[in-house]
Amino acid sequence: MSDNLSYLSGRKGLSDNLFENYVAEAEETGTVEREKLSELANDFLIGDANTFGATSFYDFLKEENKGKKVYVCNGSACLCAGTQKKLVENLSTHFKPEEIGEMCCLGRCHENGAFNYEGNNYSAKTSEEIDSIIKNKTAAVDNYYVGSNCDEPILTSEFVGVEQYYQSLWEALKKSPDELLEDYKSSGLRGRGGAGFPKSYKLEAVKNAKGDQKFIVCNADEGDPGAYSDRWLLEERPHSVLFGMILAGYIGGADKGVLYIRAEYPESVRITEVAVQDLRERGYLGENIQGSGFNFDFKVIKAAGAYVCGEETALLSSIEGQRPEVRVRPPFPAQQGLFNCPTLVNNVETFASVHYIVTEGGEAYGRRGRGRSTGTKLVCLDSFFNRPGMYEVEMGTPLSEVINDLGQGFKSPVKALHVGGPLGGIVPASHFDKLTVDFESFAENGFLLGHAGVLSVPESFPMVKYLEHLFEFTSVESCGKCFPCRLGAKRGWEMLEKAQKDGYKIERQLMDDLLETMEDGSLCALGGGLPLGIKNAMQYFEEELNEYFA
Amino acid sequence: MSTQTTNTKMSVNENGQLNGEAAIKTAFINDEAFQMKQGETILSFVRRHYGQEEVPTLCDAPNLDPFGSCRVCSVEVALEKGGKTKTVASCHTPLSEGYYIYTSSPKMQRLRKNIVELVLTDHPLDCLTCEVNGNCELQTVAAQVGIRDVRYPEGETHLHREKDLSHPYMTSDLSKCINCYRCVRACDEVQGQFVLSMAGRGFDNRIIKGADTTFDDSACVSCGACSQACPTSAISDVFQSKAIKATETTRTVCTYCGVGCNLEVATKSGEILSIQAPYDAEVNQGHTCLKGRYAFKFYDHPERLRDPLIKRNGKFEKATWEETYDYIVSKLEKIKEENGPDAIAGISSSRCTNEENYLMQKFIRAVVGTNNIDGCARVCHSPTALGMQRVYGTGAATNSVDDINDTDLMMVIGANPTKAHPVTGAKIKQRAMKGAKLIVIDPYRTEIAKYADYHLQLRPGTNVAVLNMMLYYIVMEGRAQNDFIKARTIGYEDFVQSIHKLDIDKLEEVSGVDRNLAKAAALAYADAPNAMSFHGLGVTEHSQGTFTVMLIAQLAMITGNIGRRGVGVNPLRGQNNVQGSADMGVQPHQGAGYMDVNNEEIINTYSDFYGVDVPLGEGLKIPQMFDAAIEGRLKAAWIIGEDVAQTDPNTKKVVAALSNLDILIVQELFMTETALLADVVLPGASFLEKDGTFTNGERRIQRVQQVVEPIGNSKVDGQIIIDVMNRMGYKQADYDAKTMLEEISQIVPFFRGVKWEELGEQGKQWPVKEDGTDTQILHTEEFKIGKGVFAAFDWQESAEVEANGKEYPFILTTVRELEHYNCGAMTRRTGNVEILGEDYLVINPSDAEAKGIKHGDMVCIMSERGKADVRAKVSTDVKPGILSSTFHFPEIMLNNLTSDIHDSEAMCPEYKVVSVDIRKSKGEFKRPATV
């Protein structure tokens, strides 16, 4: 984090955005040539080290990415499904080993065998399927079930068409920001990105912050393996997200919205861009929208492969073309965010919930759900379920109902569910009946609802291997800024790896110390969140794991 | 410690702000109540009350923003006594009222130890042979948290990283790096150079220089901030400045520019090992530049003059001091007897202390009996002193450099501070990056011009035209601050009438500055709540230098930007003590304390004080001395620490003048171009070898403290002057900074309350009242002169361009480079010469093409006076038709080209406008042997 770099990048801001320059330059070869990096460093007055340093951070910008032609998903769901080894073998008949790269979670957890080729995502399990994709450029198909247990779905209800959908925006723009903010407050809407922070707090802070320029940023970079609900929203309900952002802009006093979307979701980027263009053409964006005196427009930014950008401050640094390292708070983004300006950062699903709140009223939303977990939640189920897919559930729905009724049970025995992404808790089968889908139930039982992606750990999958995967994931994705995460994740990974190979036994005290150090010491939820799942596993799968400990 | 107070229930919102007004400002450390300060972090709170050692840190540094990477500073915080705690990093967590902070619970002790253990899994365990053994923060913290062993199995490490020894000063051994980012942050937040960053991600993060290159190949400006910031020896320097070899450190003040950085010099057995910048220094807050930090090895360079020399039969011969004094005294006395005292002149040195400058002018006035005393200010800021005196009554900076932090707009005219005043330059840049507006008026696209909101890239010699345009728009757009003008100034009505008559078409045409740009800049300056101006030699070294200074001073008055923090007119003084030398009376028209030597009453005061009659009436300014020497009126000159032969304009004339003297005495560190012409050479002492005071560009009188003994048979310059004074019959006690300062305080009014002991480490800004209180801001209530004076000036074309512009169509302007200082006598004898080894000529690509000159070619520059060959650097930093060149190297002798046209008022030479023509050098350029 550097205020100076934020300022210097902000001199060109979104119009000639530094990060977009990197991404555009890497389009051809997979990396940004050094001369170009130097040119950008001069243009932005930020020095060669910063352009080189920033691009070297990202999977799809760094020099090692040069010449990659196909990327295989290495996310948790594909790992547990065991599809990827065969996939790589099959792909190897078409590509040289150095042309095959990795991507972390393409959001195809519902069918696995996921890979990215020429900017499109596919799932394929057989060599015939792959041959057909590579040779015949078969269009990507992506089928999964979308359902709900709600009488009146909020997020998955049928889309009524742009014109009708935005009617409520024109109505809302007649109200004062304060009036609208009241609706937010009474809705009790909490951030859907994982932290569950009340949305109105952030928005009110942005509204009250001093500054001529403010930003609304949509965090569409939550790359939790197992969760593909953001992808569904961006691809199937982009206007829900855009609507929520425009209204936040009106309330917060911001005239720019930025959608920062994972590169691993190429379709999401394309579809969102089309939706924005549609709004522009309709005159729903720009200066003095529909005579309201309110100005707003969007910028869609495609990310470049770094899980940590899902952390809001890292995301802001990323947009600025800085290394996406987690910032200290305060200052909070609401005070000093993008280009040092007050900024609201919310998750895709959070923005998408706004339309209902505005049309039906905050209190109506607040009545939905359970307790302090108001409203509904999107839950994603992976391919171990008989009916994989994405479901909208009322907050408070029993987890067993999700598993058995919506998911229609498991295809093969599952010993645990990893809920809420890699930083979520590992829920053993014994607890499936004890939990309800809401923030409180999960927290009280020592787990985390998070983003509510549900990943199955099958009976046959060694827990030690799964834990090694979690440490590896954290180590590879760590921004490297804080010591506990940078060093701790690596050492944890090494210990688990070693324990499976050389008869090495992990000292239990050392592992406890390591987990405590990461949990208490880490700067953000990446290093701080990993220990939860590990501790769950050590508690509930003690017997299975015993042989690896001294 | 404050009294215990009842805890009120706190609720902290998302932004860490307290809900509701807090009446009692108390928080608790380990259940003990302490008073809190507005805006402090938990760490600073704990350290203030419990000492530095209570909470260890690795990534925190005194001059850097909190960063929160190491997490070693973690503490537990509860909202009530013994309540549920949360672990937070104390360095970046703001303190709130009623916090219960637990600094060393078993849990925190465990956490710190476990973090440091992780660090040690990727750190070489070679402390005993490491250069920072005993002064390594990691080593200290590891001991503090009680690490005994590393329990992790052997894993991947970064211990194989190669050292970088490419640079003359900077070194790195990144196997020792703990990834605390302190170097990266220092390069960003302190210097603003952005040479360092991290590359890679996670465990593989590693420090890079530039695009993953070496220090030497990067854009590093060698300020050393990273080396000082690094807690281990991962980044260091060739002097190993963090090693504990030194047995002593001495705090003193830098000898280079007028910023006046405080330095901490480490020595062992009378040898200087290294220099660091103290964090507590108000002037430089732990920062300095490569000159201050690294360019000190001139002091014991083999070429240092170690003995007095007398020229006999055209050759210098070593002599004893007695012999030399006898020689000088007999010569001077003979000339005085035969030709009168006015046949003798002195040029004192702004590199010397106040005490020494005072002595030199006293010697010339009281012992020789003439006012022929001048100094380097003549060729740099004499127009500033004169111009600001005319408008305000005081010829010095109105404010302090630290005011940059309180300003909304900075206007930099004719100055390249990142090169010539690097620490101030870095501060200006930092402030600009925090959003303060920046106007740069300069023919050169300087580094800060790149950061500027408005760069008025005028043709050299048109400052008056551009400032008039700005004043015009301020008046015409109704932005003049009439209340201020009415209350505190005179002459405004006539001034406005002249402004109305300005021909903007003409001013726009001659300056090459678009009127809209001038207008926008003017209005930004006028509309800023607080606007501060800085200027350098690009203002003064012109035929209209004094007028330009007066217009800058008036621009501040017309917009009311005077007399409070964050405003004012702030000349960036060149030499370390150029402010002081003028204060001490090193000027032919004013004695010590700026009192007029044409005034009989004042002369009587001086005479009484010195105990001998001192002469009435102005003496010779430096250019007049040269004329007098050529005409035979001046027979003797004593020049201290000023290489006039290399640095004054029109070298041929200067050399002719010096050669025509009966005796030229040169007191120097090195055999400079001027010393070569001398009859007697006196080996003086460098700043590291003496006590005294320097006064920096913000009027701050700071203590210079002797670090080592004068080398060889050299002597403290003040003592040399005293020895001659005594031999010429004037009793002056031996040189002692304290007693000299006492004498000075009795005659210089604004030094009245200055006492050696009381100057302390931060010094004092004059005027210093009898009771010792000093002054940060001048002219707060009224101007020294009473009412500030408005006077209009029309732009006039330089006589140089009028006379020679047709035949010599290019305009050459002389500039300075970061690595070298003026004639380079000192910096050329340090590692700096490995970084920049020659002068260069900057030429616009279109001119280069038209003249068939390529980047790196030698170019012959020709003026009416002479020629010089310089290597070309083709760059768009200058506009077509404009050239710029440095003059640090005697091989080039650039001043063969410059003219002796000077400022109409202060006689400061017009270095900045030289009409020249250029062509590609013929044949192979033969570089002359180094002097």
Image (cartoon, rainbow, N blue to C red):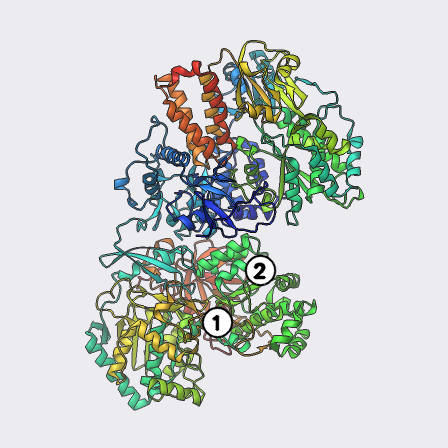
| Foreground residue among A284 and B628 | A284
Query: Could you tell me residue B712's position as x and y percent?
Result: 21, 66
Give above or below for B2 relative to B636. Answer: above
Tell me if B465 is positioned left or right of A279 in this view: left
Query: Could you tell me residue A197's position as x and y percent?
Result: 61, 34
At label 1, which amino acid type do we have? Ala
Local packing at callout 2 (Cα closer than 10 Å; few below 14, some 14-19, many 20+) is many
Query: Could you tell me residue A50's position as x and y percent?
Result: 49, 43
**Residue A237 lies in quadrant:** top right
**Chain of the residue that carries numbered disc 1 in the rendered image:** B
Circle 2: element type: strand
Task: Report the number of numbered marks.
Answer: 2
**Chain of the residue that carries numbered disc 2 in the rendered image:** B
Name the residue that disc number 1 marks: B396
| Foreground residue among B173 and B186 | B186
Local packing at callout 1 (Cα closer than 10 Å; few below 14, some 14-19, many 20+) is many
On the rendered image, what quadrant is the C terminus of chain B found in? bottom left
Task: Tell me which numbered mark, 1 or 2, is placed earlier along the sequence.
Answer: 1
Tell me if B12 is positioned left or right of B257 in this view: right
Name the residue that disc number 2 marks: B409
- Tell me if I can see residue A30 in this picture: no
